[in-house]
Structure formats: C-alpha cells, structure tokens
Image: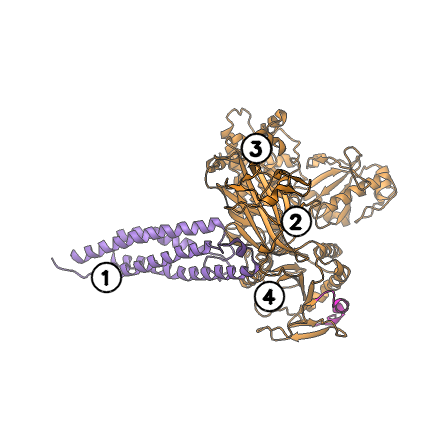
Chain colours: A purple, B orange
Amino acid sequence: MTMAFTFAAFCYMLTLVLCAGLIFFVIWQIIAFDELRTDFKNPIDQSNPTRARERILNIERICNLLRRLVVPEYSIHGLFCLMFMCAGEWVTLGLNIPLLFYHLWRFLHRPADGSEVMYDPVSVMNADILNYCQKESWCKMGFYLVSFFYYLYSMVYALVSF
Amino acid sequence: MWWQPFPNLSQLSAALGGLSGVPELEVETLRPVNLVQERNLLPPGPWSRTFRCTLTSIPQTQALLNKARLPLGLLLHPFRDLQQLPVITSNTIVRCRTCRTYINPFVTFLDQRRWKCNLCYRVNDVPDEFMYNPVTRSYGEPHRRPEVQNSTVEFIASSDYMLRPPQPAVYLFVLDVSHNAVESGYLKYFCDSLLENLDKLPGNGRCRVGFLTFDSTIHFYNLQNGLSQPQMLVVSDIHDVFIPSHDNLMVNLKESKELVKELLAALPSMFAHTRESQSALGPALQAAFKLMTPTGGRVSVFQTQLPTLGAGLLQSREDPNQRSSTKAVQHLGPATDFYKKLALDCSGQQIGVDLFLLSSQYSDLSSLACMSKFSAGSVFYYPSFHHVHNPAQLEKFQRDLERYLTRKIGFEAVMRIRCTKGLSIHTFHGNLFVRSTDMLSLANVNPDSAFAVQMSIEDSLADSSLACFQAALLYTSSKGKRRIRVHTLCLPVVTQLSEVYAGADVQAITCLLANMAIDRSVSSGLPDARDALVNAVVDLVGAYRTSVSNLQQNGLVLPSAMRLFPLYILALLKQKALRTGTSTRLDERVFAMCQFKTEPLPQLMRLMHPDLYRLDTISDQGALHLNDVIVPQPQLLHLSSERLSRDGTFLLDCGSVLFVWVGRACSDVFLRDVLGVHDYASLPPSMNHIPELDTPLSERIRAFLDWLQENRAFSCPLHVIRYFRLPTTHYVIRFLSSPYIKQTNKNIVSFNQSSVVHRL
C-alpha cells in the first residue's frame, strides 16, 4: 500500500486547515451576536442618556467586526470550490455549490450605500434581522463542522488510495 | 379573585366597544360583504388615536395568524398632544419585579395586598404608600388610584431615573446662506417667524439657542451677553472643522435675548448680495455636532440645494427621463453613509436633527433624510420653494414653522414596548434608533411623529384570554423634568378565524402594509413592493373564501371589517411614494415615503383616502358645542364621484390640503351667504379663504373648517375651486384625479377580480 500524494490530497489538506479557520470565524460571529443582544443589564443604565453613546459605539464596533469577517469567509469558501474544481473532486464540489450560491446572493443583496457589506448598525438590532443572522451562523457552523470531518476522511482516503 | 377589572371576556369586549355582547353588532361585523354588490362603503368608526393594533382580536397561535393572512402590528403615537393627561406625582412607581411593567388598569388584584402582572403573570406585593389614594383620600382601595384607572398616565420620574442632571432645552439653527438660498428668500421668513415665536420656544430659564450659517465657509455667531452687537466668526477650513470659541456660541436665551433679536433682524440683509454658490452642508453639520455634544438638544437644518463641498458632498443622481418609468426606481437609498454615521453620532449624544429642504432642484433627499431618520428628527420638504413665485409653498412653510417652533418637545428619550408573554416585536418603523430588540433610542420626541412595529406570536397565548401591550416613554421635558409616559392597550385573544376577521382594523393594516412596502421598495425594488401589496389583498380574499365555506355568491367577498381594504390598497398604490407610470420627481417620492413612515395614522388615512363632506346641506343635527361655538358635524360621504352633484358644494379633506368644490348649479343663497358672491360666474378663479360673513350658514361652515384644522398638527391651505375654469385647472385635475374620484367601485372590482381570478 503506497501513499500517493496527489493534488486531491493536497487540496483536502489545505481545506482542512482553512475549514478550521472558517469554524473559528463562525464561532466568533455567534459570540458577537450574543454580545449585540446584551444591552446594559441594569434598567437604570439602559435609560441613562450618558450610556446611550457607549451602547451605540458598542453596536458599531461589533458590526465592524462582523463585517470584516464576511469577505474573508466568502473568499476562503470560494477558494475551496475553485480547488475542488481543479482537482476534479466533483462530489465535494457539488456539496459546496449551494453554499457558494447562497454567499453570492447575500453579497449581491447588500445595502446600496456602498460602505457596508452587511450588518448595518441601524437595522441590525431589529429582532427579525438578528434572529436570521443567528440562525444563519448556527447553520453554517453545523455545515462547516460536518465538512471538516468529511475533508478529513477524504484526505486520508486520497492519501491512502491510488 | 378579590378584584379584577373585567371578570369575563364579554364584559371586556363590551367595555372596549368590541364585538360580542351586542348581538346586532356582532352579526354586522361578521357578515361577509360582496364588493360587487355593495356600493356604499364608509370607513369604520372612531378608534383610539394613541395606540392601535392591526387586529383587535389577537389570534392565539402563529398558525392562526398565518391562516388569516393579515399582518400583526401596532401603530403608536406616544407623544401625541393630549387634552387630559393624568400626571402621577407619587414617590413610588409600582412596577412588576420581573418584567418591570408599570402598573396599569388591566392588572389583577388578588387581594388588597397583592397584584398579578398582566404581561408575565408574576404576583407582586402592593407597597404601603400605594394603598392610600390621594385623589379620593381613602385608604385600602389601590384599584381606585389614577394609575389603575387610566390607560395613559404620566409619571414624574424619581431620582433613580436621572443619573445626570436633566438637560436644558438647547436649540441650534443651521442656515444655508448660499446664493441659491438668498434667491429663494426663505431666510427673511424664517427670521420673522422665529422673532415672533422666540418667547414661545418650549423651555425654561435654562433654555439655550445658537445659530450657524454656512455657504462655502462656516459662520458662527458670538451672542455673549454684554456685547454691543452679535459678532460673526468665520471658519473657512471646512476639512478640519473646529469651534472658534467654546462658551459664547450657544447662549442662554433669556440673558442674550436682545442680541438674538438683533441677529435675526440683521441676518437676511447680511447675505443679500452673496455670490457664493457652493454649499458645505457636511462640515456645517460636523460643526453643529461639536457645538451640541456637551448638552444634546435639537438641531434644525435649513438647506436649499445639493451639498457640493466638503465631507458628505452629493452628486445629482436623478435621471429626469426615468421619472415615469414603470420599472424599478433607482437611487431610493442613500448614496453615502456620511449622514447615517452623523445621525448615529448625534443619537448617541442625544442630539436630534430636523431637516427643512427648500429646494427647487434635485437635492438627493434619500441621502439627506438619513440625518433625521436615525436621530429621531423630522423631515420637511418644500419642492420648488420660492418666496415670490410660489406663494402656496411659502404659506405652508410659515404655518409649519410656527407649529414646529412652538410644539411640545421631549429630549434624551428612550421608549420600550412590552408585550404579554408569547408575543414579540420583530421590526420597528419610523424615525428612531433601535438599540435593543425591544428598546428604542429617541434623541428628540415630538408630538407629530408616529411609529409602527411588527409583531409575531412566538408561543401560544393559551394561558390567558387577554393580550396586553405597554409602551413606556422616558423623556426629559423642555422644563428639565424627567417624565415617563405610559400607554397600555389590552385586547382579547381569540381562537376562531372568523373572530380574527371581525376584529381587523383595516386602516391600521393598510398603514402597516405601507410601511412594509416602503422598506421592500428600498431593498428589493418598487415593482416587488407593489406586487406584494396586491398579493396582500389577493391572499386575504383567498383565505376568507376557504375559511367561510358557505359562500354561494360569486364576486369579491370580504369580511365586513375589511370591506374597504382593496380600495385602500388601490389608493396606496397611487400615492407618490409607490406609484409608477406617472412622472414623479425622485425627491418628492422619497419625501412621500418618509411621510408614510412618520405621520400619525389619521393623517395618513386622509392623505390616502380623503374625507368627503357636503357643505350646502349642513345642519345643526348632531353638532358639537365647544366653547359656545356650534360646530356642525356633516355626515361623511362615500368617496366616489357618484356622490358629487352639480347643485351642491363639497369639501374634500386631503390631510395636507382642503378643497371646496362648488357645483355649477349651486344655490345662490349658499353663494351669497357663505362665499360672498352674487352668482357662480363671479366666483374668483383662485380663492383661498372663506370670507367672514355675518350669516349663520357662514358661521357654521367656518366653525366646521376651523374644527377640522384644529384637529391636526399642521394646518393646511384651503382652495375653493369651480368647475373647469382655466386658472384653476391644476386644482381641478388634482381634485378629480385624486385616487377615488373616479368610477372607483367599478375600477376596484374589475381590477381585483381579474387579479383574483388570475391567481386563484
């Protein structure tokens, strides 16, 4: 039994590492949404005018952070799809295509004033948007976790087979 | 139960003027209405003006709500001017321990000492001080206290709610003095209005004012008490704005009143010969922000053109050839996020920014309006404003300014809306900043802004037969007192679809759908939003048809409560905000959208579906007697051209304008006694006032018109129009092309039947 270090194996190795990074990003996002939801605990603080500025700055800071994660995440996933296409791994590519289209759709439907990819501080605290983003993050978390183990298995398979 | 306000559901419903308990009324509201046959459709009866829900019978589960195909939401007008407002001055404000709900008329007292919250069902103790009722001076009857007897109360906040001393009233006026502004001539009228109303600005001895003018540079005014005349300080570095002097630019109004008056008298002539055509609005706003940061307050911005210099400069984006396009309208969203970021910064410092746009050309209102949208300000727009060529706009500006300067105002406000366990709020509409899923940050509150919220039913409401909503607005009054205004609404929960339909509030549903359609048109495009509105009607018809199975008639059948729904949606689709195919300037469209998001419900309904009255047959039957004046209450007519006749005079109340249409064969008595002319031919082509004649008919008509004007915030102009006389043609066209004066019934039925038939 020989170990064949094919291009496919190399792809899977790389995606494994990067997928760990993606999981990290998504966990970061989930924590950020939780932070967004927590306003000051004390109702006196909540109604204190001097705290309003802190709260707005907090929301803007978290939104900036979330926004910075968006393009790296989408481009890493795009890189995955490209690599699988080059390596000829059609099954894996097929499993990742829906998420690629979803990312494209999200990217193209962002707010029109150009500056913000998404996560607009003025509308992010509406419960429907916040709940949607949280659900999205949890789903992606599940997907990336499953993909991580799938890539691990595929890498070993690609290394061992010939 | 020792004491409970409404021991059973029918009593509550009867008390709410609701559905069950009166058999005839119940049958009436549950009766299906076939729109092909019924022609005489009048809007449903009087509703609360402060707090309205789209469904006055809340469905028990989300599944039932989905089956009804109606949106669930609230429309509130929390800071409305009220004739009577109970103010509670006691030291203890009784609130539920877990959910912090204020005690309200819908709680249950288990015995004298314990009360059960109606939102979270927790049992709380009644504090000792609460047992004494200061109004009746009796002990032991907590349920008679004013907090428990009135659904709208105002508490005086204790020192717990004030961690910084409440701010004084601070007003800053930012004025455009470029060549364009001087040409339009608004400055003189603004200064005159402010001089007249300087004493009526809400505030106490701590009230402060300041002025900032700008063209391509920014001018500050030192109004320090003790100076012989106001001093102007010019800052020309607009890329790095700084405040030239810290203490003297925002001055105490009482102390520096003479200087302020001198400045206002001198301002119009100071810039009369300016040649500056550039406008540095962005830097001026940055300067205003720096000036107001220590205190917070209100900034009123007057702008007459596109900002062309400095940060936040805007390009002309409108394509005039696209005005009548039936495809998606471009550029409904902001071009830059400069104004949005500025508004957020202002909101954090409790500064509200109001915008007065008095321009004759495209000024990118969609970007500029952001400065007010997120700082809880208001937007006023006067298209084609010119002090000589457009007297109608000038008069409107003057009236609006008078109301704006003298109306009540609240500063550094937050509002929280609480609902019964199981209901949750998911979207807010209006000029506000959402800082938490149930809490809004409002830098300024004013009595003319309303908000809308959309709700969903997360858990089944099976625990209770009542659903309650409470809106609590904590604000600082203009006199520096911290107050909490609490509104509570209580509605029954129902399990049957027919009961949901019987309790639907068609006007509230239309306005909530309008808000949703406007959001949709900005995010996915106007045609999408219009389709969604039509689908709302089609879905309702389909859902009603499947739910009420014993329908034999063919035609357009709707629940009685929703009989006007297709007409309202048609009217909505013809509004400037949402119409396609008719030439609409982009700024006017954007302003119409802003209006839909912030105007209170009665005003919006008048804009969409005006009130029609007949004036020449006015009588004293059912008249109101207010302050020794008899105010007749003519009957509301069904809004259709079938009701107009040539021998009468009709009044069309469109919310922002009043039309009096005189028929050609109108009686000479009426013409003489009310309009002061001998015959029809001598009616002047443009008449804007009903003359003050000493006849009883004239008095009645004028009393009625005055009563209509008083019941709204901004008084509106009146136009008397004749039938087809050239100079008044544009009024006639407006009157006759208003979305209703057509053979409307036939139009709706054919429109809806075709779309209904097409989709079902």
- Residue B707, given in percent of the width and then of the height, sits at 76, 43
CA neighbours of label 1 inside 10 A, class few (<14), some (14 to 19), many (20+): some
When the figure is inspected, residue A119 is found, relative to residue B46, above or below; the finding is below
Q: Does mark 1 fall on the same chain as mark 4? A: no
Cα gap from disc 1 to disc 2, whole angstroms:
75 Å
Q: Secondary structure at mark 4?
A: loop
Which residue occupies the foreground of this view, B399 or B656? B399
Residue annotated with mark 4: B293
Does the stretch in magenta take in B269?
A: yes
Please determine whether, in this image, residue B502 is positioned above or below residue B681.
above
Identify the disc placed on residue B89.
2
Q: Is residue A100 left or right of residue B84?
A: left
Give above or below for B24 relative to A55: above
* Circle 1 chain: A
- Chain on which label 3 sits: B
- CA–CA distance in space, label 4 to label 2: 32 Å
Q: Amino acid at mark 4?
A: Thr
For mark 4, does the 10 Å Cα neighbourhood hold few (<14), some (14 to 19), or many (20 or more) residues?
A: some
- Chain where mark 2 sits: B
What whole-number distance in Å separates the C-alpha atoms at marks 1 and 3? 77 Å
Look at the numbered disc 1 and give the secondary structure of its residue.
Answer: helix
Marks 2/3 same chain: yes
Q: Name which residue type carries label 3.
A: Trp
Q: Which amino acid, mark 2?
A: Thr
Callout 2 crowding tier (Cα within 10 Å): few <14, some 14–19, many ≥20: few
Mark 1 and mark 2, same subunit? no
* Residue that extends furthest to the left in the rendered view of this protein: A1
Q: Which residue is mark 1?
A: A10
Distance between mark 2 and mark 3 Cα atoms: 27 Å
Q: Residue at x 22, y 57 (%)?
A: A155
Q: Quick check: marks 1 and 3 in contact, CB under 8 Å?
A: no
What's the magenta region? B252-275
